[in-house]
Image (cartoon, coloured by chain):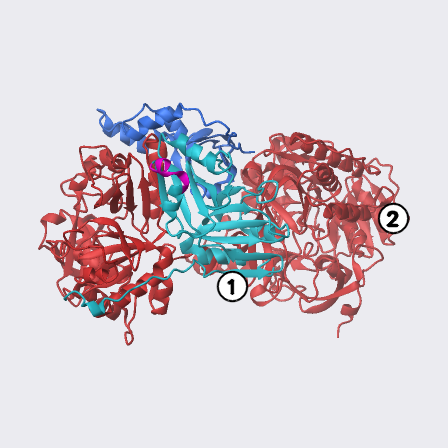
Amino acid sequence: MASPSPKQKLNFTLTASSPLGRHRTIVDGASLIEVSPRSVVSVSPFNGHEAEFNTAIDNLFDGAYPSATKAFELTGENACILLPSSYSQWFLCFDDEVPDPVAAASDLFGKKTSKHVAMTDQSDAWVILALTGPLVYRTLERICPIDCSSPAMPIGTTARTIIEHLGTIILRRPNDDNGNPCFWLMAARSSAASFLHVVTASPPFTLQ
Amino acid sequence: MIINHPHLGPRDAAEFTILGDADLLKRPDWQAGNADYAFYHYLYLRDNPAGLHRELWFHECGDRSWLIVTRDTVTHAVLDVALARDVALSSKKPKVGKGARAAKKARTKKPAKGCIAEDSPK
Amino acid sequence: MNAASLSQKNRIAGGLIDRGKPLSFRFDGQHYTGFSGDTLASALLANNVRLVGRSFKYHRPRGILTAGSEEPNALVTIGSGASEDPNCRATTTELLDGLKAKSQTKVGFLSFDLMAINDLLSPILGAGFYYKTFMWPVAFWEKLYEPLIRKAAGLGSLSGKADPDRYDKGYLHCDLLVIGSGPSGLMAALTAARSGLRVILADEDFCLGGRLNAETLEIDGKSSAMFAAETLGVLGSMDNVRILPRTTVFGAFDHGCYGALERVNEHEANGGIRQIFWHVRSQRCIVAGGATERPIAFSNNDRPGIMLAGAVRTYVNRFGTSPGKRVAIFTNNDDGWTTAKDLHAAGVEITAIIDTRPDGQKTPPAGALCVRGGHVVNSKGRLGLSSILIDNGTRIPADCLAVSGGWSPNVHLTCHHQSKPIWNDEIAAFVPGRALPDGMIVAGAASGTMTLASCLKDGIVTGQRVVRDLGGKPVKIKAPRASDENFAIQPFWHVKDSINNAFVDFQNDVGVKDIKLSHCEGFRSVEHLKRYSTLGMATDQGKIANIPGLAILADISGKTIAETGTTIFRPPYTPVPIAAFAGRSRGKEFRPTRLTPSHQWAVSEGAKFVETGIWLRAQWYPAPGETEWRQSVDREVTAVRKSVGVCDVSTLGKIDIQGRDVGTFLNRVYANGFTKLPVGKTRYGLMLREDGMVMDDGTTARLDKTHYLMTTTTANAVAVFRHLEFCHQCLWPDLDVHLISVTEQYAQFAIAGPNSRRLLEKLIDPKEDISNDTFPFMACGTILICGGVEARLFRISFSGELAFEIAVPARYGNSMMRALMEAGEEFDVTAYGTEALGVLRIEKGHVAGNELNGQTTARQMGLGRMVSQKKDSIGLVLSRREQMVRDDDYELVGLKPLDPKVSLTAGAHFIAVGAATTAENDEGWVTSVAYSPHLKTSIGLGYIRRGSRRHGDIVRAIDLLGDQDIKVKLTSQHFYDAEGTRLHG
């Protein structure tokens, strides 16, 4: 077949969709709102370049040292959250969607440092649900094996655990305007529907 | 069963998968004269102790670190949990690879000033 | 009209029931009334229903024996239809309005059970009877005896319908778990909570307080029940306390983990959650589970109306009902006298007190005959006690006999880690041993502290100890004012030489004579006694039978009780339904489902889906008018080879690997070489297990100098990633390698067929060039499509056609599929599913999961030369083992049936023509089959000995299950385009 004639050459554009179609469920005592999509980039310094990577982190995130259990926030222009995901690996989660997440992360660290940092775009890999409200512990205690209570999980703490057979990242966010606790729950995009069901089948979303 | 992760604190075993005896770390030299026997021994011959056992566990649904857990198979007490990577590194001589040499250099560097110590688990 | 429904003949004043809330219920079809706060047992007793069941083996009439979860007799079925719940203990069943209960283990009526004939046959139905009888004729066992025995056996029956109730599980964390809300439990919880610990207080009852609700003791000048209620009120108001009523902590597991079953809404769930299985993780645990009373064995000691003494006063004090009008007491300890005192104070007639101890100062209530140093030898009243006979020959009228053989601390949880309890002569009972589970302490009666004041103090002291243990500062709590009752006991386990059956295990109908028989036949250890006689093996797990049983065994063997010991205690403490363990993991929710990025599009196209692990993949896309799957699949396969097709291949594992040592790393994990892979190229990779078997295959693309992307099969993605992490962290931690999964990040589509390039060219941005020169076979790289969207393109082919795979961020999954279909319309583009994907690769002769089953080697697949002998790689050394390099080894071949109308079956085995169909003659097996529209015949791949040298041979493919015996011709596995010309176009 001959190559398409000029008048057959159509312009195709792609439309994006979020993992759960911007899901929102609000009941008495708790709300579950899809926060994805966000630009997320994984970063991991090459061997021998951990020191300059740590320095970059220090400079960006108010002198904080990378921690296996804490997330750090950068406010302002390049607002993002840095959370530990694995050994010597973090996720940078931007507040806004940026057109080229890996490039944005590289800019943040600086060209010189970025040359020795392994980065991947994770923006589409995760569904992020914000679970907020005074009754969220009732939800979490049914599905989450780790202790999410305030003394064990203060604001800014993050953990990777398993929720109903699904690997999940939990992040304790700042309380909402009414002082109610808020958690971000991140799970793999392909199981978003199953994950949503896991949460909404728990109290107070489902009557007991 | 609870595994006390060195960085993350006590976690439920449901977050992990188990591989087996920690002797799997000691992979034989493929070019040694008795490589055939050495690999056969490495893969198949196991003690089955009633007592202390060093095991490899993978924190699959956690931070994906491999851990060496020393566990008493009779009482189920977990006596020690270490990062497999640390154990493997301490028993190795430096290998070829630009990355490896640079890594060795970096390990002897002190952390940058102004840093607070990493959180230790409860 | 039923007079009984209006009266509750045995009600007396007092109790914790709420007479303002009457409840109606049914038992065996009869209507009755009870009150809120009743159990089914207390309400039945209030209505003078004494006969509640028949025993398991002998079908003897039985009544309510206890007031707790140790109940062996009063097992009833609650509910109807699908909600029918057998073997519920009436003593722990909370009475609800409209409750329907029926008795079990009878044929006919409870009062006239046709199976009662077993009782007459009891001399030959003793322990282990089925090993000695029903032997002849041999044929009768299977056809007659076993079905009969099976029908007669069993307690209760299941409805056979799906369980309509919902269950859930949950996870709780605390500093201190207190098990039991009696005096010591309450004080321990209060002490710890006031000292700042996070406390969980669990009790199996719906009304917390333990025996404080069953006694008429005084604490701080008020009733013990009032004290309990007030203390619970204080605890309930504290933020750091969580109270779990109706919750049995059934097991002490490793490392401070406890299993607990909360009966949220038993028998009245109405679509709500019925039970929750809580995983509790606690730093410390205080077992304050109290003690359980035990009976004494004598002839006919199991008649309805013969009950435990503590239970009798529980019914009077807590439930405001007297189990009888004329009550006699039989005891070997002081506690039995408390029942006499309480009943007398409540206005119930005590006809006699028989104390086995010859000396004693206690004063019997007025009018009661007092016998010291005597014992009960028999009873009368088959359907309900009417009188008892004492050893001195006196017959005493009684419709209720309260028996107390002593109290046994509930040590069970302390023994779940194989600690052995210790015999204590002073209380004639076992107390917790020394090697308790980590973090566990015992308080109160469970530890052998049997009296009120000491239990209250013990709770405080234990609570303070836990606080100190955890580094806190314990508050000072003044012990409430209470007195210690008397507790003296002289062991008396059974009346020797009983002429009739003297029962020890009521639920399994095990008597003293069975214990004697066991011992006589050589089953002399306590563990053998249990299994041979079934003592302690019923749903009550011998809570009131074990200790009397082993004491009697000790007596018979001339050993001490300490020497005899106990059987091993195992979870669960009381039965837990399987549904509670399953929780919400049922049906579709059993495991999560993974959907591909183009799933929505596939659904809108009416695709038929298949489960691949937990993924849902489009199997084929039926076109309008197609009714048979073969029509769709044949069409899809043909379309790909003729023009172009699109398939979602996002499910394959994609592992991003970056660093300066990735080439070295890949060289070690793959059998073939990877250090020289140039940037912009993809290479097929063969991955072995360390034992030399093929583990997985895939491709790895080098996107940049230090940036690679590995693909794996769908099924092995998780396992391969785990393996790579093992290799990196455990074997070669010094390599500069950084791994992360990007399976989820990208939607990936295979575009295959002669027009695949033309289709793609319509989507790529103007500056991009994917001509054969610029982008040859096995090329890879990033590319801009659809107005600036960055994609990754790979020129790889699974189908054998000119093909590409394009990866875009998953958010574009559905949109990309639509764009491909729209752009491909002029080429009659066809979406194809996993079925067609399979046919195409089989036609091409590519190995996949069926060939890579974990038991096959590279050599067998014809890929032996891919295993480099010049470098170390996982599996190299062991792949060279003698048996794995045999000359007559299995080798991959293609096969076609001689008769093209015949369909091959995967799994069929190869046997030579004319040879017998035996395992010795088995030469191999068929791994994959498909109908090839191209060749118009069924084709297959398989392994057969020396296969590569037997092309053209005829053998038989035998499927014994499907009764198939087909002649096939062996061929090359490359049925289609063996030279690969279409790939390189």
Q: Position of residue C145 (x, y in %)?
A: 48, 58
Kind of residue indicated by mark 1: Ala
- Report the chain shown in red: C
Q: Callout 2: helix, strand or loop?
A: loop
Q: Residue at x 71, y 46 (%)?
A: C298
Q: Position of residue C517 (x, y in %)?
A: 58, 42
Which mark, by number, is residue C801? none
Label 1, on which residue? C162
Whether residues under marks 2 and 1 lie with C-beta atoms below 8 angstroms apart, the answer is: no
Label 2, on which residue? C368
- First-in-chain label (2 vs 1): 1
- Report the chain shown in cyan: A
- Report the chain shown in blue: B
* C278 to B29, vertically: above or below: below
What segment is highlighted magenta in the picture? A108-115
Report the Cα–Cα distance between label 2 and label 1.
54 Å
* A185 to B17, vertically: above or below: below
Q: Position of residue B15 (x, y in %)?
A: 47, 43
